[in-house]
Image (cartoon, rainbow, N blue to C red):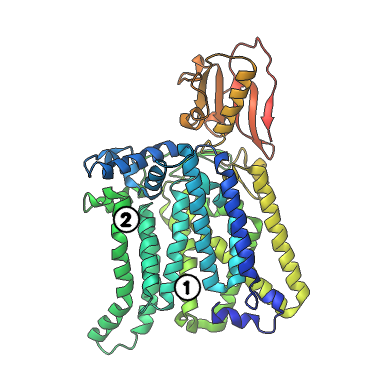
Amino acid sequence: MNSTTRTFEVNMPARLAGASSDWPEMASGIVFFILAALVAATFQDYGISWDEMVQNTYGKKLLEYYASGFRDLSAFNYSNLYLYGGFFDLVAALINHVSPFGEYETRHLLGGLVFLTGLFGAWRLADLLAGSRAALIALVCLASTPVLYGHGFINPKDSPLAWLHVWVLYFGCRILARPEQPSFATLAGFSVSLGLALGTRVIAVEFLALLAGVLVIYISQQTAKAENVTTFARQTWRIVRPLALATLAALPIMVALWPWSAQGPQNIIQALEIFSRFGWRPLVLWGGELLPSGKLPADYLTQLLLFKLPEYALVGIVLALAFAVAAARRERWALLGQSHARQYGYVALSAIAPVVGFIVMRPVVYNGLRHFLFIVPPLVILSAIGLDKTLTFAAARRNSYAIIVGTFLTLGVGLQVARMVQLHPYEHVGYNALIGGIAGAETRYELDYWGTSLGEASRGLVTFARKNHLENPSVFVCGDQESAAYFLPKDFKITDQLWQADFYIGINDPPCRYRFDEPKRAIYEVRREGVPLSYVIDLRPPAIVPALSSRN
């Protein structure tokens, strides 16, 4: 634990201080064990998200590129996937050659392992910034954030990027502690994490740019009294050189995972330009209206964060901001010269700058927070530190105050865990109490936009068909067909023509929600918190009145 954190803990009871015993580390170990057991027990519960089929295919094509001795170039013109790095997909394609599970189940297990690895990085980052108790709080808060937990299993691009972002932040903060002389292990860790992040999505250049921005402030302080240009250049290079070398070392990792990036000197710039004006612009359900994804309001991200983050995380963010303002008022300009201030500044910028960038640039976004999922871990980490410092502040005044804060946090986490249990395996659709949960969001904001609940709906249809001895039924799927077809036996026929179908499987999300003018016979519904996420409708003539089968 750093000395800054220790100064807050003078004269505190040992059981509340966090630094004076090993209980936070022991508790963190127990939490990690429980989470690992949950991943192992539940990874096969998750359905297939909209993107997974093409991502799975992209990984196979990247593997063929290497297996063919760089002759098979099909990965470079497969849809628009060549614009993305293939870190997760390439690893999944390799593992699937030896995995005893199905292709998608293996991907979900890998996603769960990436989630656990990212949590470990977040735990280390919080410990570096504020000590072991803050690290424990951060671990628990992150694990009980539904949008992070749910995406961990079904999102092969944005979730890995979010957790790689955490590792870039961790090693970046270690660099900021000693910019001129970071250890070899720190530079190696930064190179690997940055290379993997760039090999996932090119937007990871922002992680590097923000770190460089913080270093510019440090450089300006260290070179303020430089006698001449030569001295200024020498001092600047001494500070910049370690990060520059680590960045160069990250590039081969990026290229190995995203080989298209090395096929032309302009490719990386081209990818950035395309993503800044992305061509696919679906309509987005926002505030009860369908709006073009390129014309969403400036407060899109801030509203979603307000409705998607756990209530205690929102409180923690406010508390962290209050402590930051108090420190700035107390230390004033001297704060800029402190290493922990640089570290906090980097983590805070990593969460705030993308939101400001969205407000200013207004890029195309859709599917809730998923394109900006990488800002959620640093926000929750800062929130956890705010809660930890509040515990310290309260305990320094009266023990009962700290007990009240601890009780609030425990109840908040318990509430979130209960919500996640009820939502499982659709944690990603969760909304907090500020909007009334998913019941309050149902007709106003997107729910299961990725159609992962289509798998459960398909299994419900199979049960119904077998019970009623139906042969070769035809099925129309409103959503990604693979999300349903993977769970249907071979005697079920998928049709693209609604009028030819015996059954309809659809998600409770535009445009599927409005496909029928009047209610039809629902034989199965996937419900959470009383809200249907997807459903099966019998389109046959009403000769037989089927029994309703649903799950809550």
Direction from residue 340 to residue 178 in the image, left or right: left
Image height of 36 relative to 222, above or below: above
Q: In front of the other: label 1 or label 2?
A: 2
- The residues tagged by marks 1 and 2 sit, at their Cα atoms, a distance apart of 25 Å
Decide if residue 439 is in sight here.
Answer: yes
Outermost residue toward the top? 543
Label placed on residue 343: 1
Where residue 510 appears, as percent x and y from the top left, is: 53, 33
| Residue in front for this viewpoint, 300 or 146 | 146
Q: Earlier in the sequence, mark 1 or mark 2?
A: 2
Quadrant where the C terminus is found in the figure: top right
Image height of 94 relative to 14, above or below: above
Quadrant where the N terminus is found in the figure: bottom right
Neighbor class of circle 2 (other Cα within 10 Å; few <14, some 14-19, many 20+) is many
Q: Residue at x 55, y 26 (%)?
A: 505
Secondary structure, mark 1, is helix
| Residue in front for this viewpoint, 440 or 18 | 18
Q: Amino acid at mark 1?
A: Gln
Decide if residue 144 is in sight here.
Answer: no
Where residue 294 sits, quadrant-wise, is: top left
Q: Amino acid at mark 2?
A: Met
Where residue 226 sits, quadrant-wise, is: bottom left
Q: Residue at x 60, y 74 (%)?
A: 323
Where residue 133 appears, as percent x and y from the top left, is: 62, 70
Direction from residue 77 to residue 534 in the image, left or right: right
**Figure label count:** 2
Where residue 161 appears, as percent x and y from the top left, is: 44, 54
Label placed on residue 427: none
Where residue 322 appears, as percent x and y from the top left, is: 61, 71
For label 2, the residue is: 254
Secondary structure, mark 2, is helix
| Residue in front for this viewpoint, 312 or 324 | 312
